[in-house]
Each structure stands twice: as C-alpha cells, then as structure tokens.
Image (tube, grey):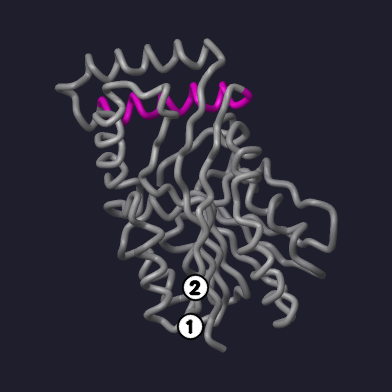
Amino acid sequence: METFDSHWLALRRRVDHRSRSEDLVRSLSNWWTSHAAARVVDLGSGTGSNLQYLAPRLSGRQDWTLIDHDPQLLREAKAPAGQIKLDCLVGNLADVGLSAIHNADVVTASALLDLVSAEWLETVANACADARCAVLFSLTYDGTIEWTSRDIDPADSVVLAAVNEHQHRDKGLGSALGPGASRFAEELLRHLGFQTWTAYSPWQLGPEDSELVYELVSGWQAAATQQEPDQKDEIWCWAGRRRAMIASGSFELRVGHIDLLGLPPY
C-alpha cells in the first residue's frame, strides 16, 4: 500500500477537518444514536485524523479499530476525550481490514478510495452489506485541481491530465480507481440497497496553507513526470513557476474531494 509520512499527514489534518461535510456527519450521528451503535472500523487510519474528527461528533461509548499497514503511523494515533476504546491493528487492508468489518456498526475511511482497486472496493462494499453497517468515505479526490483565474498557468492542463492518469496506477491494492472512485462506490452501495448521500468537500487553499501547497506541487511534479517523462522540462518549469507564486503569498487553489455516506436498508 502507498506510504505517507507523518509530516504530510500532519500538514493536511487541519485542512481535511475544515473541508469535510458536517451535514453528512450529522446524518451519520443521528443513525448512530437511533441504532445504539458503538463499533467503528477505520480503514487506512494513518495517525488517526479520522478518529480525531469523527469521534467527538458521535455520542456515547465508542469502540474504534484503526487499521493501517504502517505501525509507526498508528503509534501516533491518540483517542480524544470521552468513552472511547481504541484498538490499533497493523496489517494489509486486503486481509486485516476486510476481516474487521464483520463486527462493525460503522466503517469509515478518509482520503483512501481513489487509491484502491474496483475489486477491493467491491469486496468492502459486500462485507459492509453483510455486516449491515453504515459507511462514511470522506475526502476522496475527484480529479479537480483549480487555481484562480488570475493564476492560470499554460501548463496546468498538462500537469492535471498526467496526475489524474497517474492516480490509476497500482497503489498496493490493484489498479487504483482514481478520480472516479467516489461515483463507483456510490453505485456499488446503491446496488446493495444502501441509501446514499454525497457532498462536495474541496480543499480551499490560500497563503495560510503555503507549506501544504508547496508539498502538493512537489507531489504533482513527481507524479506527472513519472507519468509523462517526455514532458519533464515543461512540468518542472511549471513547478518552478508555482513555487514562486506560493512564495509571493498571493494565490488561491481548490482541490476537489467528495464525501459519501451510505446507510444500510435495515
């Protein structure tokens, strides 16, 4: 599975939390209370950002199982205040992650679906249907990278196309779904009888997020170059112009994401 370092996860945590759909979380919270739910399985947990955001918005006793292949990241996960029991499991999402779902009331994941394969997601959806659990898949990248009109660069479209194609490469669970993952997941859940709702949850980034945007540009530069090596010079020049713009402190950037809530028909 693709690995992310704790510095990157720390950079994005604040932006992730402010971008997520509160409406979908309120709907999940209402379902949680009415069904006396208590058990949450979080897939691809990293350092526990999803736990930190969602647990305070759910009521009562909570048993959280965090699953990630990186033990160093999981060691940084801490439960927020409240009646929260935390269990961290190190393992591949293709086996440990799937086996944990059958005991869940809610299955969650954040910034994960665009990195997984259709086959894996189908297996997860079926496991959730068998467990009759709710699902909340947040911050799935939707293929949108938009700088404000005054900041458009002639190479933006070249980089975007290369990055989005790179998203389909194998990230550890087969050929990744990439920007179409949220739509694919919603169709799967509906086919299995779930009621579904989606909400747009874009990152709205500005000068206060300069360090994060700098890392984004570097990541896009690397991915685009790997995908289109013949266009390396154009891509690297683009990255240089974007870094200069970030340093100037005058920019706005929107990176598209989608949140998806699925409630079982029971």
The x, y position of residue 256, in whole percent, is 45, 44
| Residue 223 painted magenta | yes
Q: Identity of the amino acid at label 1?
A: Asp
Of discs 1 and 2, which sits in the foreground?
A: 2
The prevailing secondary structure element of the residues shown in magenta is helix
Q: Residue drawn 41% across and 59% down? A: 182
Q: Identity of the amino acid at label 2?
A: Thr
- The residue sitting at the left extreme is 230
| Residue 88 painted magenta | no
Mark number, residue 196: 2
Horizontal placement of 80 versus 149: left or right?
right
Q: Residue drawn 59% across and 26% down? A: 209
Name the residue beneath numbered marker 1: 130
The x, y position of residue 1, in whole percent, is 40, 47
- The residue sitting at the bottom extreme is 266
Mark number, residue 26: none
Horizontal placement of 176 versus 126: left or right?
left
Horizontal placement of 23 versus 252: left or right?
right
Q: Which is more toward the observer, 141 or 93? A: 141
Q: Which residues make up the magenta segment?
A: 208-225
Q: Which is more toward the observer, 223 or 153? A: 153
Element on which disc 2 rests: strand
Horizontal placement of 237 versus 66: left or right?
left
Q: Residue drawn 50% across and 53% down? A: 200
Instruction: Count residues near mark 1 (Cα–Cα under 10 Å), then give few for <14, some for 14-19, many for 20+.
Output: few
Q: Quadrant of residue 218?
A: top left
The x, y position of residue 87, in whole percent, is 68, 59
The x, y position of residue 211, in whole percent, is 57, 22
Element on which disc 1 rests: helix
Give me the C-alpha separation between circle 1 and circle 2. Answer: 17 Å
Quadrant that contains the C terminus: bottom right
